[in-house]
Amino acid sequence: MVDKRPGALLNAVVAIFLQALLNAFAGALVLWGAAQDVGHGREVPGIVYLLGYLSFLITVVLVVSGVLLLRRVAWARVPVAVIEVIGIISGLVTLAQGAPAGVANLALGVLVLVSLFRAETTAWLNPRLF
């Protein structure tokens, strides 16, 4: 049984918390922008509010999953992996459109996925398997 928390897991959790912080900021920025538009008499499409609140939902899922991973709950990798794959796809689309900001999505997503599914991380999360 592996007792020491692997460094790869710590790297993943730090990246997950960073993404959660950035998602919360992005959601707040989107909702603030929508409020500014409404304040100036412009109509805001409902999708803007949906994206803002979805960003907060992703933040909560990432934070809860990060805490669960630190507590050795193996299934917490699944929601993180889904969010990371969506982020990687989003980063690829952003890059294809010519915006270099997509590199951040790609880099963080790949870092988290590789770190979460390394052998030592899996062994630590599922000690009964090894």
Image: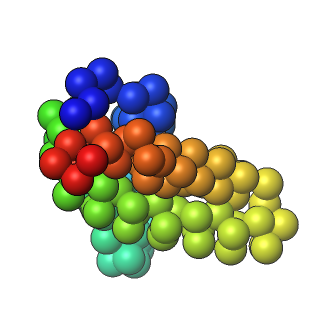
Left or right of 96 in this view: 122: left
Asked whether residue 19 is in view, the answer is no
How many numbered circles does the render carry? 0
> Residue 65, relative to residue 48: is it above or below?
above
Q: Residue at x 22, y 33 (%)?
A: 1
Residue 18 horizontal/vertical position (percent): 45, 34
Residue at the extreme right of the image, as rendered: 98
Residue 43 horizontal/vertical position (percent): 41, 74
Left or right of 41 in this view: 91: right
Asked whether residue 111 is in view, the answer is yes
Residue 54 horizontal/vertical position (percent): 30, 63
> Residue 51, relative to residue 45: is it above or below?
above
Q: Residue at x 52, y 63 (%)?
A: 87
Residue at the extreme top of the image, as rendered: 4
Between 82 and 45, the one nearer to me in the picture = 82
Q: Residue at x 45, y 26 (%)?
A: 7
Q: How is the image coloured?
A: rainbow
Residue 73 horizontal/vertical position (percent): 16, 46
Between 43 and 55, the one nearer to me in the picture = 55
Q: Quadrant of residue 49?
A: bottom left
Q: Residue at x 47, y 47 (%)?
A: 118
Left or right of 39 in this view: 22: right
